[in-house]
Image: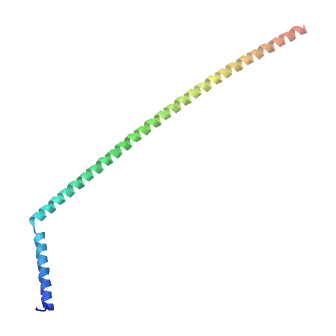
Amino acid sequence: MRAIDLKDRLSAANEARKAQLERAKAIAEDPERAERLRARAAVVQARNARIAERKAAEQALKERLAAEEAVRRAAEAAAREAARLAEEEARAAREAEQAARAEAQAADRDAILAARRAGRKARKRKGKR
């Protein structure tokens, strides 16, 4: 049996390295592999396009919902403001009616008191004569 010396081991390693390099070159230059890589890149690009389209659709939906919510809130605020104004007008009308009623009652009371005073005055004058 022959002993394997350093020179044999180095040449075997060198040949293995060369063979591995040749295999790597063959794989890299393989037209089928290049076609597979192009197909994979096309699939990735299509997937990224679908993802971007989906995100754009979601963003548009969010913006539409936000706009609808803003319109709804504005309508609610306008309705609340109209209800508040109507209530304020109704309250002002009630207060004006109460004030007019109180004024009429005060005038009636004053008329009654004036009539009483006039009656007392008349009796007093009648009694003096």
Residue 81 on image: x %, y %: 50, 34
The foreground one among 4 and 126 is 4
Left or right, residue 118 beside residue 96: right
Q: Which residue is at the front of the view, 16 or 95?
A: 16
Q: Residue 38: image x %, image y %?
A: 15, 61
Which quadrant of the view contains residue 9?
bottom left
Q: How is the image coloured?
A: rainbow
Image point (71%, 18%), residue name: 107
Q: Nearer the viewer, residue 115 or 84?
A: 84
Residue drawn at the location 62% of the way across and 26% of the way down = 95
Residue 118 higher or lower than 100, as above or below: above
Q: Quadrant of the N terminus?
A: bottom left
The image shows residue 74, relative to residue 15, as above or below, that is above
Residue 77: image x %, image y %? 47, 37
**Does 118 appear above or below 78?**
above
Q: Residue at x 61, y 25 (%)?
A: 96
Q: Is residue 50 left or right of residue 20?
A: right
Q: Where 48 falls versus 94 (above or below)?
A: below
Counting every numbered tag in the picture gives 0
Question: Picture coordinates of residue 124 (x, y %)?
Answer: 87, 11
